[in-house]
C-alpha cells in the first residue's frame, strides 16, 4: 500500500504542474467566467473534470491491455510519451507567456449550467494533447500490479484537481488585479512547467518496461 501512496503523491506533484500551465482549458475557463459569471466558470470547470475522467479511464485501460499483450509495444508507447513530454517541455521553455483576448472581455448575457458544462467537457475531451499527456503520465505510474481501485483513485484525483483549479481560476482570475498579476508571471510558470516536463520525459525514457 505504501508503494501506491508514493505513486499517488507522484501523480499529484506532476499533474499539479500540468494543471497550472496555461492552455486551451485556461482560455475557456477565463472566457466563460468573464463573459457569463463565476457560476458559469464553475460548471465549465466541472466539465473539464469530467473530460479528465474519460481520458484517465481509457488511457489506463489501454495501458493495461498493452502491458498484457506486448512488452515491446508498451515500450514503443512509453518512448512516444517521453518524446511528447520533451516536445512540450522545450516548447514551454520558449514561452513568452499567456496572451489572449480574454483579458479584455466583460460580462454579457448568461448561459445555462448545461451549456457551460458542455463547453468545458468538449474542450477537454477533444484536446489531443490531453490524451498524449495522460498516456505519458500513466505509462510511468501504472504498473501491472496496480489494483483497479487504485487506478480509479488516480483518475478521480486528476479530475478533482482539474475541477478545483479551474474553479479557483473562475473565482480569482475574474478579479482584475489578481488576473493581471498571474498573466505577468505566466511566462515563468510555463518555463518552470517545461523544465519539469523534460525531467519527467527523461525519467520515463529511462524507466525499464515491467
Image: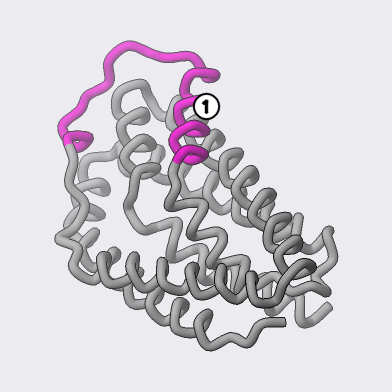
Task: Say which quarter of the image contains residue 49.
Answer: top right
Query: Vertically, is 94 above or below 2?
Result: above
**Going 46% across and 74% down the picture, which residue do you hit?**
82
Residue 42 in view (yes/no):
no
Residue 187, horizontal then vertical, whole percent: 20, 63
**Going 22% across and 35% down the picture, which residue do you hit?**
102
Residue nearest the viewer, comparing 119 with 131: 131
Residue bearing the label numbered 1 = 117
Query: Vertically, is 199 above or below 147?
Result: below
Quarter of the rendering occupied by the C terminus:
bottom right
In this figure, which colouring scheme has been used for the structure?
Answer: one colour
**Going 49% across and 57% down the picture, which residue do you hit?**
132
In magenta segment, residue 123: yes
Q: State the count of labels.
A: 1
Residue 145, horizontal then vertical, whole percent: 83, 74
| Magenta stretch, overall SS | helix
Task: Say which quarter of the image contains residue 61.
Answer: bottom right
Residue nearest the viewer, comparing 13 with 151: 151
- Residue 22 as seen in the image, left or right of residue 137: left
In magenta segment, residue 124: yes
Task: In the displayed orientation, state which residue is furthest to the top.
Answer: 109
- Residue 30 as seen in the image, left or right of residue 104: right
Residue nearest the viewer, comparing 210 with 168: 210
**Going 22% across and 40% down the picture, which residue do you hit?**
176
Question: Bounds of the magenta span?
Answer: 101-126
Task: Say which quarter of the image contains residue 93.
Answer: bottom left
Residue 125 in view (yes/no):
yes
Q: Residues within 10 Å of mark 1 (few under 14, many from 20)?
A: many
- Which secondary structure, mark 1? helix
Residue 28, horizontal then vertical, whole percent: 35, 35
Residue 80, horizontal then vertical, whole percent: 48, 69
Quarter of the rendering occupied by the N terminus:
bottom right
Amino acid at each position: 500500500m505504501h508503494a501506491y501512496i508514493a505513486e499517488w503523491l507522484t501523480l499529484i506533484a506532476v499533474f499539479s504542474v500540468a494543471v497550472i500551465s496555461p492552455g486551451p482549458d485556461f482560455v475557456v475557463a477565463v472566457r466563460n467566467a468573464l463573459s457569463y459569471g463565476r457560476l458559469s466558470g464553475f460548471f465549465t470547470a466541472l466539465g473539464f473534470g469530467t473530460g479528465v475522467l474519460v481520458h484517465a479511464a481509457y488511457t489506463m485501460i489501454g495501458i493495461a491491455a498493452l502491458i498484457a499483450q506486448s512488452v515491446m509495444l508498451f515500450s514503443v508507447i512509453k518512448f512516444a510519451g517521453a518524446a511528447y513530454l520533451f516536445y512540450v517541455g522545450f516548447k514551454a521553455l520558449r514561452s513568452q507567456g499567456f496572451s489572449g483576448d480574454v483579458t479584455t472581455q466583460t460580462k454579457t448575457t448568461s448561459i445555462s449550467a448545461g451549456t457551460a458544462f458542455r463547453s468545458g467537457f468538449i474542450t477537454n475531451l477533444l484536446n489531443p494533447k490531453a490524451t498524449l499527456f495522460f498516456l505519458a503520465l500513466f505509462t510511468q505510474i501504472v504498473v501491472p500490479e496496480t489494483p483497479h481501485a487504485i487506478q480509479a483513485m488516480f483518475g478521480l484525483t486528476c479530475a478533482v484537481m482539474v475541477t478545483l483549479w479551474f474553479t479557483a481560476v473562475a473565482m480569482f482570475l475574474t478579479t482584475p488585479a489578481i488576473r493581471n498579476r498571474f498573466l505577468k508571471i505566466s511566462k515563468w510558470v510555463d518555463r518552470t512547467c517545461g523544465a519539469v516536463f523534460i525531467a519527467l520525459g527523461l525519467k520515463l525514457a529511462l524507466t525499464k518496461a515491467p
